[in-house]
Each structure stands twice: as C-alpha cells, then as structure tokens.
Image: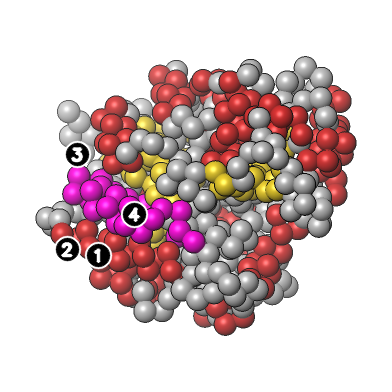
C-alpha cells in the first residue's frame, strides 16, 4: 500500500488547473499515482511527490480540467453510421449519395445511414420512391438526426412485410408507419422506435444486417476514440429502443471491448422502456441488468422511461395546445397510471429513473410521479433525473430543487437554426421564448448535468463538449458570433456552471461524484489538458479548443503528441484520431 508521500508516477506542473472543487478551485500542479490523484496544489508542493522515476510534464500554463462526464449519449446509434453520415449532405443530394454508395459497394446487402434533418427536407422528398430511384434492389434504411423518423425504400418495407393492409399504428400509438391518405400504401417514413425496430429486426433476421456484437464493436470502437479525443472519460448511455430490440447486446459488446483492453471510457448504462416497446416489466428488467452487468468500467444502473416525443412530430406533451395544431397537446408514450406505477416501484427498489420529457406537461407529470414516490417510499439517496426539459413551466423549475431531481439537458439545441425555427412555429412565440431556461434552473439551486444526446442532433452533428459549452454560454451556434441569439439572452450560462454540468454534476447523476468529476486528492485520475484556456478566450472560439491529452483512471486514452514527457499510451488507439 503506497504512503501518501510516496513518489508519484506522473506530475503535471506549470499549469492552470481548474479543479471544480469549491474549497480549492485553482492549482498549478497535480500528481498521479496509479489510478488516483495523489496531490493537487502548487508547483513547490509537487516536488515532494517527485522521485527518480516520476515523469514530470511541464504543460506551459495550459488549462487542466477533470475529464468530461458525457451524461447523455446513445452508443447503439453508432450502428447507423457504419455506412452513410448524412448530417452535412444537402437534402436533395441524399438520393444521389445513396446511389453513389450502392454503386461503389455492390457487396453490401443493405444500406443504412444517419443524419438527415427533418425540418430541412423539401415536401415530398422523404418517400420510398426517391430512395427506390437510387437503390431498388437492396433495402435502404436512413435514420433522421433526431432519431425519431426513419426513411426506407420499398425493398425494406417488402422484407418487413409492411403494406397497405398493415395497421398504421405500432404498439400503443406512439409509433407508426406513415400511410398515403388515398392508397393507404406506406410512404416510406417510419415514426419513432417500434416501427423502426420492426423493419430493423426483419433485415437482421434475414441476414441483411450484422447481428450480435459484430453490430457494435467496430462502430463503438471508432466513436469512443473520437470521444476520448474530445476529453470524455465517462459516458452515460441513455439507450433508446435498440434497433434489434436486444438491449443486452450493447452491454455484451462493451464487455468484449473491456476484456480485450480496448474500452477507452467508463460507461454507465440503462434499460429503456415505453409502452408497447416490450412486454418485459421494466423494473424487473433493470434490476436484472444491474445484477448482471457490473464490471470495473461498465455498469447497468438506470431505468430510462420515454414519457413523450418531440416537437417536430407534435408528440411532445404540452400543457396547452400546439399553436399550429390547436386540436392537440401532443401525447404521452406511457399511460399516466402506468408511468406512476413504474416510478413508484423503481424508487422503492432503489433504482434511479431518468425520464425523457420534452414538453412542459410531460415535465410536470414526471415531477408529480417523483413527488408521489418520494412521499410513499422510505428516505434514501435518490438520483432521479428528467432529461431534456426544454420547455418547463416557471412554476415547476423550483420543484426540481425541492424534490432533488436532476435536470439533464442538451444546450447545443438551444440555438436559432432550421430545427428551432420549426419549433417556434409549432409552439408559438410566447412559449418558444420560455425554452432553454437553464441558468434559471441553476439560480434556483437545481443540479444541471449536460450531455449531447449524441448521435442525435438537430441540424449539425456534434460530439465535443467544448462546442456544447460554447452554445450554452452564447445561445448561438458554435463559431458563429453573428448568428441570432436564442431569446432570453440573460439565460446564457456562466462558464463555471457549464463546466460543472460536464464534470461534477454529471458524476453526481451517475453516482460517481465520490470518485470523479473534480480534481481532488484520492479521486480517480480522470484528467484532460486543453490547448487553450476557455476562461481567457473569446466566447465564440470556445468550441475550437482541442484536447491535447486525456487520462482515465490514470491511463492515457488520447494523446495529441503535443506535450513532451507524457508516458506512452496504455490503451490501443490512444493517439490522435
């Protein structure tokens, strides 16, 4: 057992270290011994921890932060990016992109892709016929950037057995096959998870798509390198209806990466549920997952409940009707009585619950359910969470603090872009101006954690936390100082609050705050070195910051090769990608 004064393996000196520790927020040196932090303080004090074998790295006054905690991601979505990334493809060019890929990859039995932006699509483009003209002999399946719509060709529908006689609604009405109002033939657009899963399952069962861990190991392996290069050391996988419906497959894939020393991230996972998604009892399912999947780097922990939908699909659940469709307030994806029962049982079983809520009525319903569970069950350390909460009624914001509910959100969507312009039309101006009020959340003492919801996106694909931090600080797209500012510019968040949202608050959400999230002696050595100091630079340049070095558990997971004296990487693929 090492003594507190034993030499460290590594010392970073001549740094600006923002520790995210309220007692000692700033330091100039940090020492690492094994997996943990042995010292945080000034350069002079670090000399005590420097022995003949200690590697000393002069970081040249660069900024050091705790490793980023990405508290809302979807690793299973990487499977849709095996072939086509469509985020920056002009809508009219998507069929030609599919055609070019089909012609250059004749051996591929199916073509999948991710990233078309629904609000930017011209009328009549998202139909099976446009994809048929590009590729008719093989199934094509393209997931939208926000994950809530899927565009398929006729061959994919044929393989899945979906035609004019197939009931339009799937499950409990939260997912459907869009049908032509005259012919009743499917148009080629699928809305939400159950409809998408039916097609994906059919393609997998008939050998058109990979199955088993082969589906994920390669795609996750690629994206985790990008995340490590972005400074991410810990990730919460918020799941969604896995394309094949087998939620255990993700954990099994992560297990392969961990056992072969290729896992660069610490992953906390979840079990995902909405009515009609599965017949399995969700509380029993997450309890089973928590017992089965618990290793050094991977653990199942949270029950994820999908309570409402999205603004674009008019399925976000609102307190008042949509401005453009006054006949509807949207709807819930789980019946309120069922939802309350699940929350009550999960809470009684010691399970943390994350609830997807986009509309203000969904947020209120979730808060009501949590309030009942807290009142009914014995006291305990709860880490329940409402994710998104883009539109929250002013009366409900203080309830987060009162009930101890974490607000997990995605500030990179709180900007003016084609997606938000459609939301503005659907919600109306008054309600649109009430969105993304997370500085008010913080001022009310609410714990706000941040995550990209990636690879879901509105109009651009982002995975680097510094881009998210910039948008939260400016309420504008990264690197666009001349862009319109999201209404209520006083809701721009302060840099310390944004950094906390990506470090200690995310760690708190995942029950890792005693181990990570701040640079404190005894915690795990999750450390990142940035090439620029975000506290001292022009706000609209924050998103351009590069991560020079990432350490997780004291091991280098990303090295840009810019810091002399850094120990050789311990993980495969830790060099710059």
Q: Residue at x 30, y 66 (%)?
A: 368
Tell me how far mark 4 sits from mark 1, CA to CA. Answer: 13 Å
Q: Which residue is mark 2?
A: 375
Question: In this rendering, does residue 540 appear at all?
Answer: yes
Mark 3, other Cα within 10 Å: few <14 / some 14–19 / many ≥20: few
Marks 3 and 2, how far apart at CA: 44 Å
Left/right placement of residue 133 relative to residue 160 reads right
Q: Earlier in the sequence, mark 3 or mark 2?
A: 3
Query: How far across and how far down the image is residue 112, in percent?
Result: 69, 33
Quote the CA–CA distance across marks 3 and 4: 50 Å
- Furthest residue to the bottom? 430
Closer to us: mark 4 or mark 2? Answer: 4
Spatial separation of the CA atoms under disc 4 and disc 2: 16 Å
N-term-proximal mark, 4 vs 1: 4
Q: Identify the mark nearer the N-term, 1 or 3.
A: 3
Q: Which labelled disc corresponds to residue 371? A: 1
Q: Which residue is mark 4?
A: 339
Depth check: give the residue in front, 542 or 76.
76
Q: What x and y, as percent, mark residue 97?
A: 83, 38
Q: Which residues are magenta?
A: 331-358
Tag in front: 1 or 3: 1
Question: Which image quadrant: the N terminus?
Answer: top left
Q: Is residue 552 visible?
A: no
For mark 3, what is the residue? 4
**Seen in the image, is 460 located left or right of residue 289?**
right
């Amino acid at each position: 057992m090492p003594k507190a004064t034993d030499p460290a393996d590594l010392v970073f000196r001549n740094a600006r270290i923002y520790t995210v520790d309220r007692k000692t927020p700033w330091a100039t040196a940090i020492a690492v011994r094994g997996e943990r932090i042995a010292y945080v303080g000034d350069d002079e004090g670090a000399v005590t921890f420097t022995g003949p074998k200690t590697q000393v790295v002069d970081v040249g006054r660069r900024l050091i932060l705790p490793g980023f905690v990405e508290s809302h991601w979807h690793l299973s979505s990487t499977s849709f990016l095996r072939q086509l990334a469509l985020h920056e493809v002009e809508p009219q060019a998507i069929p030609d992109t599919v055609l070019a890929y089909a012609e250059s990859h004749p051996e591929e039995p199916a073509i999948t892709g991710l990233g078309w932006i629904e609000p930017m699509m011209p009328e009549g483009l998202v139909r099976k016929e446009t994809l048929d003209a590009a590729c008719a002999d093989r199934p094509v399946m393209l997931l939208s950037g926000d994950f809530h719509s899927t565009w398929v060709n006729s061959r994919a529908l044929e393989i899945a057995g979906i035609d004019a006689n197939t009931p339009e609604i799937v499950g409990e009405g939260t997912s459907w096959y869009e049908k032509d109002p005259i012919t009743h033939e499917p148009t080629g657009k699928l809305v939400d998870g159950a409809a998408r899963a039916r097609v994906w399952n059919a393609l997998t069962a008939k050998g058109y798509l990979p199955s088993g861990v082969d589906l994920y190991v390669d795609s996750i392996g690629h994206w985790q390198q990008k995340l490590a290069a972005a400074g991410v050391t810990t990730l919460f996988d918020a799941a969604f209806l896995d394309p094949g419906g087998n939620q255990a497959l993700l954990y099994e894939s992560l297990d392969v990466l961990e056992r072969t020393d290729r896992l660069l991230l610490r992953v906390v996972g979840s079990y995902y549920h909405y009515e009609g998604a599965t017949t399995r009892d969700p509380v029993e399912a997450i309890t089973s997952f928590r017992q089965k999947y618990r290793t050094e780097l991977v653990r199942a922990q949270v029950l994820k409940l999908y309570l409402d939908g999205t603004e674009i699909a008019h399925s976000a659940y609102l307190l008042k009707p949509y401005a453009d469709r006054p006949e509807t307030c949207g709807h819930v994806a789980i019946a309120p009585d069922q939802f309350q029962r699940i929350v009550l049982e999960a809470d009684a079983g010691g399970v943390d619950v994350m609830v997807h809520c986009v509309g203000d009525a969904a947020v209120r319903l979730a808060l009501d359910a949590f309030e009942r569970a807290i009142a009914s069950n014995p006291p305990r350390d709860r880490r329940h969470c409402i994710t998104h909460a883009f539109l929250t009624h002013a009366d409900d914001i203080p309830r987060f603090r009162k009930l101890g509910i974490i607000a997990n959100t995605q500030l990179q969507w709180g900007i003016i872009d084609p997606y938000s312009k459609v939301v503005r039309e659907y919600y109306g101006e008054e309600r649109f101006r009430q969105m993304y009020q997370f500085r008010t959340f913080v001022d009310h003492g609410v714990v706000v954690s941040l995550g990209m919801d990636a690879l879901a996106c509105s109009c651009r694909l982002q995975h680097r936390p510094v881009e998210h931090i910039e948008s939260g600080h400016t309420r504008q797209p990264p690197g666009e100082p001349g862009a319109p500012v999201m209404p209520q510019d006083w809701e721009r968040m302060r840099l310390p609050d944004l950094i906390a949202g990506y470090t200690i608050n995310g760690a708190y959400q995942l029950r890792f705050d005693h181990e990570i999230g701040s640079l404190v002696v005894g915690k795990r050595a999750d450390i990142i070195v940035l090439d620029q100091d975000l506290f001292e630079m022009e706000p609209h340049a924050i998103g351009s910051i590069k991560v020079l070095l990432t350490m997780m558990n004291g091991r280098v997971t990303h090295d840009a090769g810019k810091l002399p004296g850094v120990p050789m990487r311990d993980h495969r693929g830790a060099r710059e990608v």
